[in-house]
Image: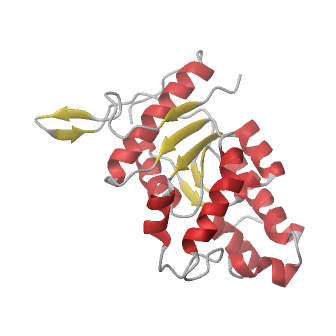
């Protein structure tokens, strides 16, 4: 199992951007949204964390494009390494295999290069994985409220942790259990019912402010 997941497949300061239309995150030009111009590059990989339906993959792809950085989905990388679906890994390889595999894959991705990484639903809730991300990357929690998450995941068949008809009950328990752990992320941005591009803008500004505060000597490299 170690070789499987190890192989390649070709000052803590937190910012909480809860509001959806702050002056910094949403400027207007004749009533139209204008994306902020930000001149920086992340000094470390940016790792998106959060529950299912928070938008880690969709926001992550757009964020990577804005930074002109590679994008990786750790769930996909784990499945490629294991040769089976995420939901089947523990049954195929033994209890704890998924948690161990996620740590190996995420640490490998973080060490590859500066890139944007979308993680699995529970990745950041595992102590060893959370510690590694906090030490070697910039963690960004895409925080969704119950209504937003429920709207996005209900009826979806690619959510192995959900059971049809019990989505609300399961999500409520996950929020109670896991949000205290997700709060340890470097940056928090609430995901709202808004165009993805606006959410990306708010993420960029939150990351920018975190970098300015945490890495005051970091040199601005180029505009994104």
Asked whether, in this view, residue 101 is left or right of residue 124, the answer is right
Q: Residue at x 61, y 76 (%)?
A: 162
In this view, the residue in front, 89 or 192, is 192
Left/right placement of residue 29 relative to residue 38 reads left
Q: Quadrant of residue 161?
A: bottom right
**Colouring chosen for the image of the structure:** secondary structure
Count of marks placed on residues: 0
Question: Residue 52 or 163: which is nearer the viewer?
Answer: 163
Q: Residue at x 76, y 62 (%)?
A: 102
Q: Residue at x 69, y 60 (%)?
A: 122
Asked if 97 appears above or below 185 in the picture, the reply is below
Answer yes or no: is residue 10 visible.
Answer: no
Q: Quadrant of residue 83?
A: bottom right
Name the quarter where the N terminus is drawn: bottom right
Check the picture and name the quadrant holding the C terminus.
top left
Give 20 or 171, whichever is nearer the viewer: 171
């Amino acid at each position: 199992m170690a070789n499987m997941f190890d192989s390649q497949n070709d000052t803590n300061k937190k910012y909480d951007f809860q509001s959806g239309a702050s002056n910094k995150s949403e400027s207007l030009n004749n009533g139209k949204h204008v994306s902020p111009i930000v001149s920086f590059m992340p000094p470390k990989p940016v790792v998106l964390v959060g529950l299912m339906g928070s938008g880690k993959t969709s926001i992550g792809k757009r964020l990577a494009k804005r930074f002109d950085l590679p994008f990786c989905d750790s769930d996909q990388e784990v499945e490629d390494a294991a040769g089976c679906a995420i939901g089947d890994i523990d049954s195929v390889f033994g209890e704890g295999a998924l948690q161990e595999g996620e740590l190996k894959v995420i640490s490998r991705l973080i060490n590859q290069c500066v890139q944007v990484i979308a993680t699995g639903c529970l990745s950041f809730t595992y102590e060893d994985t959370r510690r590694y991300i906090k030490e070697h990357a910039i963690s960004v929690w895409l925080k969704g409220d119950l209504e937003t998450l429920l709207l996005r995941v209900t009826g979806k068949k690619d959510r192995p942790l959900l059971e049809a008809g019990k989505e609300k009950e399961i999500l409520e328990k996950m929020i109670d259990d896991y949000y205290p752990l997700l709060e340890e992320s470097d940056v928090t941005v609430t995901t709202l019912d808004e165009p993805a591009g606006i959410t990306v803008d708010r993420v960029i500004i939150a990351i920018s402010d975190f970098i300015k505060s945490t890495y005051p000597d970091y040199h601005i490299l180029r505009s994104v």
